[in-house]
Image: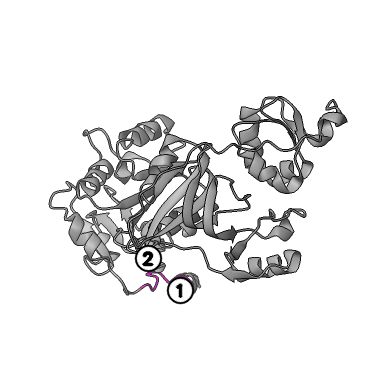
Amino acid sequence: MYILNQSGRTVDVPENMELEMSYRNDIKVLSVSHNFWRNYPDQVAVLKKKNVGLVTDEQLNAVPKTEKKEDLPIKRIEGRVNIKIPKGKIHFVIYPNYLPKVGGIETAVYELAKLLDRDKYFVTIAYNSCESAEAMVKYSKVAKLVKLDDRGLNCDVCLLASNHLQPPQIRAKAWLQWVHSDYEKYNNLQLVENKNIFKYVAVSKHVAKVCKRMFGIDCEVIYNLLDPNFGKGIEKPIRLVTNSRLSPEKGFDLNEGKSKVVRFAELLKASGRNFTWTICGDNTHMPNEQIRIIESLKHIENVNFVGYKSNILPTLTGADFLVQLSNFEGCPYSILEALQVGVPCIVTNWKGVEELIEDGVNGYIIRQDMKGVDINKMLDNIPKGFDTKPKGNISQWDKLIKKSLCLKK
């Protein structure tokens, strides 16, 4: 990596310091090594936005060699960050240098800061630059945020969140360093050489073994943390599936204002229940009608049209209900397929439907005029364990064919 320092001189940065220097806002980056370009494409993209004309070191042929020996720019510490730490609490600082909105390491920083016991710890996240105000709001919910700039910060323990140099602004009684990556996969990328690291913390046994093998470092293994309440108290969405031609007689009739499908979707939304409704099918014979049908449900964001599916099984498997709100049917395959894989059905009361669906046993039968539909009753009592044996049997055809031949003799 070659940079322009504050005095306008070109400086040669060793490869093991490139990542750290790439987050600095007080320098201009002229080029990065080929390994950095290949291993950190996201950071290269960020650098390109801030440093127009960024190239690899090999492409930067015009840099005079005599100007490549100046020392790296050193930040001057001017003043200190004053934080009043409650008596008896440990001041724990996490230093990620750069705060983006998303990323695995960033999630690890967030979760650690969130889960540390506030009766024991005062948690600060110290950084030099931040991607957005949105990111700052996120992190500020779990820790005190401090933008270092040229100010010093004292603490009890500082955790380097990744492969960072120890920032000169921070004075800590003890240093920890997180190791998140399998360095054997990064083309000889080295750990930054920091002094007085009390313990390196690897996120897996494999990462710890790699560190021992490559750098001779013994790591303590602590797997990435996740809030114990993650996913709890959140209602899983009810999954509804329809597999049907998009035509009026299948419950999509718009001539009377709102179709049965629209009215049922609105009842679902009004119930406040968490649901998704995937509608498979098209209407190649009436494309304009298909467009009207899709437009009629745009106000229900939980409804998704996915087009014709030659294999409905992946969509059907795991569904809570198949929904078929037809005006009339013979013996619809969509119902037979659903029942055979154990998916109950919500259907309208077309003539003959009771031959396939027993209300409350393997599905629910609702009125054609949609009156009296009890959404919560159906969603709270999803039929399970019903008979999935096919209604039809090939032996019936076999007998009929043989019988017809006997009669001809």
Q: How is the image coloured?
A: one colour
What residue sits 69% from the left and 26% below the top? Answer: 7
Q: Dot 1, crowdedness within 10 Å: few (<14), some or many (≥20)?
A: few
Q: What is the magenta range? A: 388-400
- Tag 1 residue: 403
Residue kind at label 1, given as amino acid type: Lys
What residue sits 64% from the left and 68% below the top? Answer: 208
Residue kind at label 2, given as amino acid type: Pro
What residue sits 32% from the left and 75% below the top? Answer: 385
The numbered dot on residue 228 is: 2
Q: Mark 1 or mark 2, which has the lower sequence index?
A: 2
Q: Is residue 279 above or below residue 180?
A: above
Q: Quadrant of residue 56?
A: top right
The numbered dot on residue 193 is: none
Figure disc tally: 2
- Front-most of residues 6 and 58: 6
